[in-house]
Image (cartoon, rainbow, N blue to C red):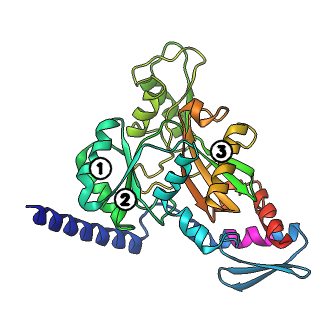
Amino acid sequence: MGKLKHTMLEIQRKLARLRKLWADIRGSSGQTYVHDRVSEYRDIWHAVAEEIGADFSVLDDRVYEIARGDQKIRILNFLLPFDNPVTLEIAGMKPLVYRLLAENGLPVPPHEVFRLDGWQEAGELLKKHPMGVVVKPATGTSAGKGVTTHILTSKELRKAAILASLYCRELIVEAMIPGECYRLLVLDGKVVHAVRRTGPRLVGDGITNILDLIKLENEHRKERQEDLLDIDRDTTFTLGYQYLSLDSVPARGQNFLVKSVNDPVRKRVEVRTVYNETVTDIVSDSLKATAETVARLIGSRLVGVDMITTDPTVSLQESGGVVNEANTTPGMHHHYDISKEKYPLPAVQAVTSLLSR
């Protein structure tokens, strides 16, 4: 019987791989990844070079050189030459990173490491966290690839494990954590910028329940030709940790979060985090110190430290938040508004740091 179950899992895994290949061929993922931003990054580095009085050269379609006097660096699309290969590999090993952080007193999500044929044992964590879990590859992915959120059933857990196994044989299941996602960019040991994946918020009037407030908001969004607020698992989860439900009537003037995840294609699979608000001035010194500690523990000169918290003005311990990712070679496009700025300010700081060494 065990052999039959293993065979069925492998068949399902191969079918999932075929579906992924077909989606890639069709270009139907619905996501724009950093690798797709070649022209944007060429413009960023060109503008940065002009800003600092350096020469900019295109060596190949995705390879650029910035030179100032005897100083010279080369950039591959979004990749800057800060960290050595060992550091980059270690940062991509999520179980090891979690262990290093936990051993140094930093909060990480409750999690278990497993392999595909052990997915049923991974279900024990789901029993402990019935509000939902996340499954992701344990090593070497980014931009949400292989990740499934808001898993509520064993069947969904198995399907998520199959998807994640396409990227890595070792997998992680971890509890869903309340809050919005923040990325703190650490350069040479100091936080230089912070952004947030800001979810939609509504304000109560003391009369109308949340379901009807969402309906009213969607009428306004239709008029403005904006994406509508759909009611999904993220809505239920987000309201729940604020002790609210669709039937709740928020007090007059009460500001509340409706969704934590910006999921434009309305799915829970491989959703790429889109940071849409600069919050450098509101994150606490404690969060900044935590991000700087993460960078030191990993040994990275340039890293985007992702945190989930309900309150960025206090420590993670106070809010119940966690560090959930350490991203070396972080994309600079998260750290500016392309409609208003020619380049991200941290990009100037990063290039200046490289040239100075």
Q: Is residue 147 visible?
A: yes
Kindly identify the amino acid type of the residue bearing the numbered disc 1: Ala
Mark 2 crowdedness (10 Å alpha carbons): few <14, some 14-19, many ≥20:
many
**Is 211 on the left or on the right of 17, as rendered?**
right
Q: Which mark is residue 171?
A: 2
Q: Quadrant of residue 237?
A: top left
Residue at the limit of the structure toward the front, as seen here = 103
**Is 189 on the left or on the right of 139, as rendered?**
right
Q: Which residue is located at x 81 percent, y 66 percent?
A: 353
Q: Is residue 344 visible?
A: no
Kindly identify the amino acid type of the residue bearing the numbered disc 2: Leu
Q: In terms of depth relative to the viewer, which is nearer, 223 or 76?
A: 76
Disc 2 to disc 3, C-alpha distance: 26 Å
Q: Looking at the picture, how far across and down is residue 60, in whole percent?
A: 68, 86
Kindly identify the amino acid type of the residue bearing the numbered disc 3: Thr
Q: Which residue is located at x 78 percent, y 61 percent?
A: 342
Q: In terms of depth relative to the viewer, which is nearer, 112 or 330?
A: 112
Q: Is residue 222 above or below residue 60?
A: above
Q: Which mark is residue 122?
A: 1
Q: Secondary structure at mark 3?
A: helix
Q: Which residue is located at x 50 percent, y 52 percent?
A: 99
Q: Which mark is residue 54?
A: none
Q: Is residue 114 above or below residue 230?
A: below
The residue where tag 3 is placed is 290
Q: Secondary structure at mark 1?
A: helix
Residue at the limit of the structure toward the bottom, as seen here = 59
**Is 343 on the left or on the right of 253, as rendered?**
right
Residue 221 magenta: no
Q: In terms of depth relative to the viewer, which is nearer, 97 or 132?
A: 97
Mark 1 crowdedness (10 Å alpha carbons): few <14, some 14-19, many ≥20:
many
Query: Where are the magenta residues, as a range?
Result: 41-47
Q: Looking at the picture, how far across and down is residue 53, in whole percent?
A: 91, 72
